Amino acid sequence: MPVEYKDYYKTLGVKKDASADEIRKAYRKLARQFHPDVNKGTDATKRFREVNEANEVLSDPDKRKRYDTLGPDFERYANAGPGAHPGGFGRAGNGGFQYVYTGPAGSDPFGGDAGGFSDFFRTVFGDMAAGGVGGQTFTRRTRSRAQPGVDAAYEVEVSLQEAYRGSERTIQLQREDGTTRTLQVKIPAGVQDGQRIRLAGQGGAASGGGPAGDLYLKIRVKPHPFFTREGDDLRAELPVALHEALLGAEAGVPTLKGKVSLRIPPETQNGRTIRLAGQGMPRAKERGGGFGDLYVTVKVVLPQKLSERERELIQGLATSRANEDPRGHLL
């Protein structure tokens, strides 16, 4: 059965001229997505192995060079003699390579690097794991390449007050061996809903001396009963009595810093919005620092259970303004 060509660039979702950093980022993202400890889908394990195989080749300059040189026409080189490819790639026959495994029965003849990899990988890169020339037997050699640890994600829920002031959380992460480790993490002031906080080196453990993965905290800010957040600004509805809207008043307004006084101008219309500068959320330093604003929308509350005297006063107001039609512009 012919060996199927593997498009490793397509597997990682990168272009053929992708940089080493782009390949590393794509690998970490996909490895985290399909890691068997995270993804229980039926194809997750298969995709995880494919992603690891693609990274094994594209993250290694020597393997990547051979892969790019051979391309989809690899089988022509695979069946050729020595010298058919500048990397010395070939199989037994006409003085070519002959692979003779002398390790324990039932073990993988390609060692740690090729264990579980596809036939395509073994066909193209087998001589990088074990080999012999001219009928001489070579004991397999295992080369453990440094592999970065898998990134991890953890969701943290905070109140709007905690997002305003900043807070700390104690979180527990489960290792692959089933044990847990505890971390004390800081939630910065001004953090936004959906924001990701990167904790370098706090993710999955690496192999072969590679760097540990990163831990990403995904922040969820709980809804607040009074404030609605828009970026660094806050919005709120302020109930105002009819007489306060008509005559003007000083009204107390809650903020995340504490209570402040707001002047309601006379004859304030229902729905008018008043800005309180600097009473919003903390603004990140890269956006200039400081604080956002609080926008208060006046919500006029009409009186209920009127007394006879109050009815007379309102009737007098109605009589004096009988010629006014607030809907005249609609007709």
Image (cartoon, rainbow, N blue to C red):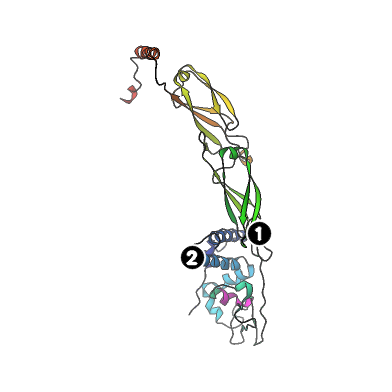
Q: Which residue is mark 2?
A: 43
| Residue hosting label 1 | 212
Q: Residue 60, image x and y in percent?
A: 63, 67
Between 26 and 184, the one nearer to me in the picture: 184
Q: Secondary structure at mark 2?
A: loop
- Which residues make up the magenta segment? 121-128
Circle 1: element type? loop
Q: Amino acid at mark 2?
A: Asp
Residue 59 at x, y percent in the picture: 61, 65
Residue 127 is one of the magenta-drawn residues: yes
- How much space separates mark 1 and mark 2, taking CA atoms? 26 Å
Q: Is residue 87 visible?
A: no
Q: Which mark is residue 285?
A: none
Q: Residue at point 58% right, 33% down?
A: 256
Query: Which residue type does callout 1 highlight?
Result: Ala
* In the image, residue 263 above or below residue 179: above
Residue 251 falls within the magenta-colored stretch: no
Which residue shows up at 58% across the image and 26% down it? 260
109 and 225: which is toward the camera = 225
The image quadrant where one finds the C terminus is top left
User: How far across and down, in percent of the image, does residue 93 sit?
Assistant: 58, 87
